[in-house]
Amino acid sequence: MALTGLPPDTDADVARVTEALAMITPRWNVRVLLALNGQPLRYRELAARLSWLRDGQLHPKVRQLCEAGLVERIEHSPRHVTYGATDRATTLLPVLPLIVTWAEQYLEKPEQPLPAIEQVEDSLTLLTRRHAAAILWALKIRGEASGRALAMAVMPGSDWTNVYPPLRQLVDDGLVATDGNGQPYRLSPAGDGLGPVLGALSAWSAGQPLTQAGQHPVWGNAQAAPGQRKWLVSHPRPQAPTATPAPARTGQTPRVWQRTALFSHAVPSRPLAALPTGGPRR
């Protein structure tokens, strides 16, 4: 059953990416996956890595990720159970540096730099706004569109004025731009800059190698940056396809990613100062 008025292939693509985002965006889910990426852990070992989470918070997360096929529960004996990231989850990890690249370029800058994992979490929250994926796809395809035209593409059968709350949210978030009431909507530079991220998420959600992201019919053909981001870890990691990274900012050399750049065992913290204007809101 079609969820949007977009062509069937595009509608299916939007639905897959929306479902994928729903798996990983809930708070702490990415941190759980990163903690389990490597040697399988017993529950108490996992809890020690995520010590700021109470058992009542961690256990439901692990169960949900198991149900989503991203975490595997292995029962060695009734008293010996371990949890580990599945191959499906492992192939997701190369998407995370792409998200950080986008966040560093387009998100508002706090007074104190945020850890990369928080950049990922903030960015995923923006992408899971209601109807966000469908609106971004429609605007990328059409270039510009009125609110009524977007409503027909994104929520056919619904009162067309219902498109304005999610549209206004995306404008406030800095992903969509307009010149004013009654004027067409278009992707902002930040929204258009999501191409490598959305192409990679589309490839991953379709079970394709992330190297296919650049060939995405809507978000593909993004210019590749020289070099490839790498993950440096202290233990063996299953090999996974890597996505073409987003263009690096002029004058900067490609970053080499440490595991600790995206995950820290420390209790997460947020700056208390208000964020300045100038980019998509967190």
Image (tube, rainbow, N blue to C red):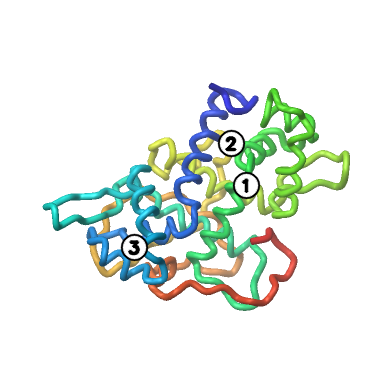
| Rendering coords of residue 144 (x, y %) | 76, 37
Q: Is residue 24 visible?
A: yes
Q: Earlier in the sequence, mark 1 or mark 2?
A: 1
Relative to residue 117, is residue 194 drawn left or right? right
Q: CA distance from mark 3 to mark 2?
A: 33 Å
Q: Is residue 228 visible?
A: no
Question: Counting other residues with Cα less than 10 Å from the Cα at mark 2, is it few (<14), some (14-19), or many (20 or more)?
Answer: some
Q: Residue furthest left?
A: 77
Quadrant of residue 247 within the rendered picture: bottom right
Q: CA distance from mark 1 to mark 2?
A: 20 Å
Question: Counting other residues with Cα less than 10 Å from the Cα at mark 1, is it few (<14), some (14-19), or many (20 or more)?
Answer: some
Residue drawn 81% across the image and 46% down it? 178
Q: Earlier in the sequence, mark 3 or mark 2?
A: 3
Q: Nearer the viewer, residue 252 or 134?
A: 134
Task: Tell me the quadrant of the picture where the C terminus can be found.
Answer: bottom right
Quadrant of residue 173 within the rendered picture: bottom right
Q: Which mark is residue 129?
A: 1
| Residue at which label 2 appears | 218
In terms of secondary structure, where does tag 3 sit?
helix
Relative to residue 134, is residue 72 drawn left or right? left
Residue drawn 41% across the image and 71% down it? 52
Q: Is residue 177 above or below residue 257?
A: above
| Residue at which label 3 appears | 35
Relative to residue 239, is residue 101 drawn left or right? right
Q: Amino acid at mark 3?
A: Ala
